[in-house]
Amino acid sequence: QWYQRRVRENYYTNQIKLIQKKINSNKLDDAIFLLYEELKMPYIPSYYEEEFRDLLADTKKRLQSHKKIGNLNMHLSGEEVQDILNNSQKEEEQIIAITSLSFSNIRNFENAISNFLNNS
């Protein structure tokens, strides 16, 4: 009986490591697939079930963030760029604003960029 418990614990520990490896290498869809596969099993020890659910929630948030950035046109209006650089504390928004500058004449944003860099 102790042997079965140990094998089961090793299985779940290995699955969690595999899923974390997928997450760390940004293979988020693969990680979510594995998590759903694990969570639809008829029995999961409560500790591991909680771990899988936490990983799923975190991975879904991460995937949404990646899709949100990927789906943006990266073309913000000049006013939006200046507003984000001057007021936003969200790193994701700042990255989008800075990326959108590559499509603009940055001389028009000299003050906003200077203020952003001085406040960072």
Image (cartoon, helix red, strand yellow):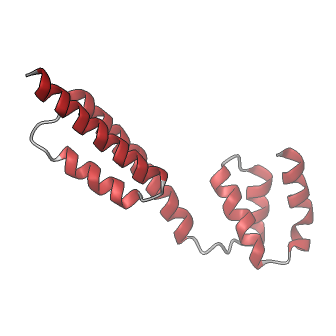
Residue 70 to residue 8: above or below: below
Residue 3 to residue 19: above or below: above
Furthest toward the front, the residue is 3
Furthest toward the top, the residue is 2
**On the picture, is 83 further left or further right than 52?**
right
Q: Residue at x 40, y 53 (%)?
A: 22
Instruction: Count all numbered tags in the image, as a single digit.
Output: 0
In which image quadrant can residue 13 be found? top left
Classify the position of the N terminus by image quarter.
Answer: top left
Rendering coords of residue 100 (x, y %): 71, 71
**On the picture, is 111 further left or further right than 38?**
right
Residue 107 to residue 81: above or below: below
In which image quadrant can residue 7 be found? top left
Give whichever of 18, 50 is nearer the camera: 18
In which image quadrant can residue 110 be found? bottom right
Q: Residue at x 42, y 44 (%)?
A: 58
Residue 84 to residue 5: above or below: below
Rendering coords of residue 63 (x, y %): 44, 57
Rendering coords of residue 109 (x, y %): 87, 67
The answer to whether residue 43 shows anywhere in this view is yes
